[in-house]
Image (spheres, rainbow, N blue to C red):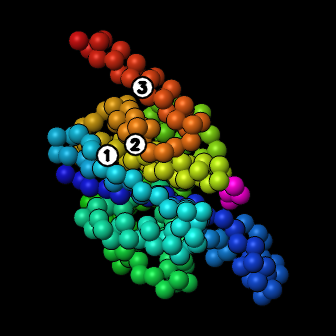
């Protein structure tokens, strides 16, 4: 049995931090330094992969500055969630290079302690047994020099490009509707990460679940159990119908 918490975060450039740094280093360019970014939303999705190959979606939580007040509260929410699930592998995509530095900087500023899964004493090896923190992007990169974007993985798994539209960047929300969309985006990212990870688990001999079935189970659970925007609900409904039809056709051909 493998127990995961898939997490995602969204961040924004802090102009005050950047300009203060430029007073020291005038050559510093905007939008290139992690130290001048702040986290405004996080999400966490618990999923268990059973020994028989089945998956259980066991809950999702998210935190935004709109609902919880500030960066400290948003990061604290994610940390508390991970601490409450110490037996789960914390999984993200490209997290060693981006997410871990961001949450560590936030923890330093706000006097927070990192949860055990994110402590840097853990090994970030590219192969071997799963550690308390799994960076799927780093696993796919292995010893190579090229990073694979998660959308490229999802496209290879047959998910439509329309579902990932706007995935690369989320602007800082300025009204309640935009905050709801940012939360939904962050939650969707954790579900998409779970789909990609289950497909990778199969390559490692740790999961026998068909990627199409995993995609359907996870996305259908998401649309039924989370308060998403109507636009995202409509996208997920269409994707789930298409996946169900494809799975049904495949089973009929195999019968």
What residue range appears in magenta? 171-175
Where residue 214 appears, as percent x and y from the top left, is: 34, 36
Q: Earlier in the sequence, mark 3 or mark 2?
A: 2
Residue that numbered label 3 is attached to: 243
**What secondary structure prevails in the magenta region?**
loop
Q: Quadrant of residue 52?
A: top left
Assess whether residue 172 is covered by the magenta stretch: yes
Q: Is residue 117 above or below residue 60?
A: below
- Residue 182 appears at what percent x and percent y? 59, 52
Per the model, the C-alpha gap separating discs 1 and 3 is 18 Å
Mark number, residue 225:
2
Q: Are marks 1 and 2 in contact (CB under 8 Å)?
A: yes
**Quadrant where the image shows the C terminus:** top left
Q: Would you place residue 51 above or below residue 118 in this image?
A: above
Left or right: 54 with respect to 120? left
Q: Residues within 10 Å of mark 1 (few under 14, many from 20)?
A: some
Badge nearest the viewer, 3 or 2: 2
Q: Quadrant of residue 151?
A: top right
Q: Secondary structure at mark 3?
A: helix
User: Going 55% across and 63% down the picture, which residue do you hit?
Assistant: 67
């Amino acid at each position: 049995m493998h127990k995961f918490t898939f997490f995602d975060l969204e961040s924004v450039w802090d102009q005050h931090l950047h300009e203060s740094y430029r007073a020291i280093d005038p050559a510093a360019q905007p939008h290139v330094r992690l130290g001048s970014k702040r986290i405004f939303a996080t999400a966490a999705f618990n999923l268990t992969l059973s020994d028989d190959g089945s998956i259980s979606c066991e809950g999702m939580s998210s935190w935004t500055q709109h609902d919880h007040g500030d960066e400290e509260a948003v990061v604290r929410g994610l940390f508390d969630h991970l601490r409450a699930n110490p037996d789960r592998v914390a999984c993200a995509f490209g997290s060693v290079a981006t997410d871990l530095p961001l949450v560590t900087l936030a923890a330093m500023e706000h006097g927070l302690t990192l949860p055990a899964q994110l402590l840097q004493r853990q090994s970030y090896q590219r192969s071997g047994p799963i550690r308390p923190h799994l960076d799927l992007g780093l696993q796919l990169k292995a010893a190579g020099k090229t990073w694979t974007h998660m959308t490229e993985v999802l496209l290879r798994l047959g998910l439509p490009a329309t579902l990932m539209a706007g995935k690369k960047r989320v602007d800082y929300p300025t009204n309640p509707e935009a905050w709801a969309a940012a939360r939904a985006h962050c939650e969707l990212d954790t579900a998409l990460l779970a789909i990609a990870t289950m497909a990778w688990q199969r390559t490692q001999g740790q999961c026998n679940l068909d990627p199409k079935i995993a995609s359907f189970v996870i996305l259908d659970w998401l649309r039924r159990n989370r308060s998403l925007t109507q636009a995202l609900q409509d996208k997920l409904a269409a994707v789930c119908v298409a996946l169900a039809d494809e799975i049904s056709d495949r089973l009929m051909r195999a019968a």
